[in-house]
Image: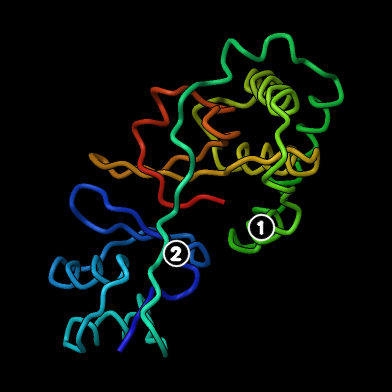
Amino acid sequence: MAYRLRDGLSCCILGGRTIFLDVAADRYFCCPSSVDGDLRRIIAGEEVEASEQIDWLIRHRVIRSVTGQQVPIPASACPAASESSIGLDKKWLRAGSLWGLIRDQLHMKRRLGQRRLDDILSELGNIRPDLNQEDRAVALAGARAARITDWWWSRNDRCLVKSLALTRFLFRSGCPASLVIGVRQDPFTAHCWVQHGGLVLNDEIDQVRKFTPIFVL
């Protein structure tokens, strides 16, 4: 029998455990260590035999059975963060970018109060531009606008709404980007940021490297 993660789950390995993000429920969780070995094999695309552990994973809607050949589950991946826009974006201030990003921040704040996160991510996916296109100037203009809005939106708060807004702004401008959600331990914390390739647009390299990506749009 072949198995794979149910739809709506993404995962990463953190501290030797498999951590999950259930986007529809907007929650993080991990499974008992007794089932973690089977989970790792399923995620790696290996065949596993039916067992009590597999039954537990099915009952708790972590995995589902599939017909045919075992299909490997691709891990969420994004280009490694190699540089930050901080210091690179100073000459890219555009009034249109600033007001456009402010509108998108207000839009995302309102949408997060009305809709589930998975619905919002689906909406963003529907307007994603061709990922083969490159427009570093637009990305840096968006980064500069995001930096300016930090003057009245604390940089340490609301990382989700600000990153969703920046992603929407870039997508609507025809600029490809990656919305990244990462997690870390001790204590468990989640964080969100936006990249254009390996260029981090709304955070610092040292900050995002503290987190392991668990979801990438």
Write down the quadrant of residue 148 in the picture.
Answer: top right
Question: Residue drawn at (76%, 32%), measured in percent from left and top?
Answer: 101
The N terminus: image quadrant:
bottom left
Residue 217, image x and y in percent?
57, 51
- Relative to 116, residue 162 above or below: above
Q: What residue is at 60 percent from the left and 33 percent from the top? A: 196
Per the model, the C-alpha gap separating discs 1 and 2 is 14 Å
Dot 1, crowdedness within 10 Å: few (<14), some or many (≥20)? some
The local secondary structure at tag 2 comes to strand
**Residue drawn at (16%, 87%), measured in percent from left and top?**
52
Using the rendered view, name the quadrant where residue 152 is placed: top right
For residue 105, say whether it is visible: no
Which residue position holds label 2? 22
Relative to residue 102, is residue 197 drawn left or right? left
Q: Amino acid at mark 2?
A: Asp
Q: Amino acid at mark 1?
A: Ile
Q: Which residue is mark 1?
A: 120
Residue depicted at x 58% and y 43%? 178
Front one among 118 and 38: 38
Q: Is residue 194 above or below residue 5?
A: above
Q: Is residue 91 left or right of residue 198?
A: right
Compared to residue 32, the image places residue 206 above or below, namely above
Dot 2 alpha-carbon crowd within 10 angstroms: few under 14, some 14 to 19, many 20 or more: some
